[in-house]
Image (cartoon, grey):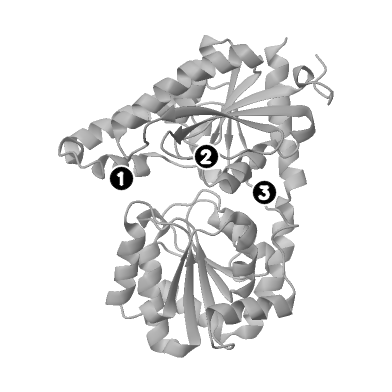
Amino acid sequence: MNFDSKSSVSNKIRLLFVIGPKDVLPSDLLIKKLNEITVELKESSKVYVLGGYPKARSAPPDLPSPFELRMIRMKAFSRNPITMIMYLVFCIFEGIKLVKEEDIHVIMCYGGHVHLGLVAYIISRLTRRKCIVRVSADFLIPLYFLLKDSGSFFFENNLFLNVVSLIYRRLETFLFKHFDWIITQGPMDFIKVKKVTSKIIFIPLWVDLERFRPLDEEFVKRFKESLTDNDEVKILLFVGRLHPEKGVRTLLEAFRAVVESYGRSKVLLILVGMGIANYMEEYKETAIRMEVADRTRFIGYVPHDELTKYYNIADLYILPSLREEWSNTIMEAMACKVPVIATKVGGNPYLVVEGKTGFLVPPKNPRRLAEEIMFVLDNTSLAKKMSENAILEIKEYSKDKIGKLHKSVILNVIKTEFK
């Protein structure tokens, strides 16, 4: 079979991605995640995306070539375990139908390796296809929040949650042993999964160095002026989900200490990202209680294409996560010549070189985080040197280099399919 032909879909690699019920929106984030794996396959592939979209909404977004969206339409997608189970069952039936109709070669998922991975695995086995799964995060922590936020007394029982945890880990181990290939985007996940199977490779995320780069100084100045009336203010930036796992409360506690010591008018904290459930409102109230609300900006969701300008106005990027396998935002900040302070967890020490491109701090330690923030702000020459080092270090993670690794894995799995 010739997979390099551009003249016909039948001569292209055909992939099916199973995604979560709400992963269709925002569409730019969906495209970004798909591109992380398929960037080097675009000219020779057709990528079908099986996702969910509420019936109450207008038409789902159109995706650019080579992606094609196939929808599971349900009345609503609530934070309810029963709704999630229904969605996964529908995905299995629709996925089997789609594989047969389009002669899919490989079924994949880029996240949710247990629940979405189980769906991909079942589809692959019932259609005699191959299955590749990328392990990008441990879903057990979000699962706890999903069950607790469901409002059911039954799901708030700790004994029940412990049983769920045990079942989750057993299922996870089973899937690790039976997936045809596993890609991890983080080194810690690689070490964990490697103990279970040898069919695994560590491929870090890549950063688009054409998009994330230092911008024109005059443009950056005007954008900064639109957010603050003080040209001399030092801007601290956080980009990510407003969620306890991201350590947002620790960041706010550290920022209070910075404001008290460094000067209220001299610093501004900008948080870019949406809250899950009611966390955004909770953190806004926390900022008020800590008396830093006037020095804090909750920007909300920003399209991925527009994040570059926020990185460019930042004097320091901060990521105080409790867990972080491999951070897109650290790479994006470094590509924009911004020094980084991050927690010493997961893949962060692989990206942040202590004293060279930034600093690493223990998680849940606002005092230490505040000390490092003020140290960098007080040492402008060091900060400048770190920013210069950052942009040099991050070139190792270009999309061409990382994309070719993904392409190699997919092609090798397909070759075994047709032996």
For residue 367, what is the image quadrant? bottom left
Distance, label 1 to label 2, CA atoms, is 21 Å
Label 1 vs 3, first from the N-terminus: 1
Give the quadrant of the N terminus: top right
From the image, tell me which residue sits under label 3.
Answer: 206
Q: Mark 1 or 2, which is nearer the eye?
A: 2
Q: Quadrant of residue 143?
A: top left
CA gap, disc 1 to disc 3?
29 Å
User: Is residue 178 toward the left or the right of residue 203 in the image?
Assistant: left
Looking at the rendered structure, the kind of residue marked 3 is: Trp
Q: Give the residue drawn at x 47%, y 27%.
A: 72
Closer to the camera in the image, 112 or 175: 112
Q: Where is 91 relative to 220, above or below?
A: above
Q: Secondary structure at mark 1?
A: helix
- Residue 345 is left or right of residue 142, and the answer is right
Neighbor class of circle 3 (other Cα within 10 Å; few <14, some 14-19, many 20+) is: many
The local secondary structure at tag 3 comes to: loop
> What residue is shown with label 1?
145
Residue that carries the numbered disc 2 in the rendered image = 24
Within 10 Å of disc 2 (Cα), the crowding (few <14, some 14-19, many 20+) is many
Q: Nearer the viewer, mark 1 or mark 3?
A: 1
Please state the horizontal and vertical placement of residue 389, each as a whole percent of the image.
70, 69
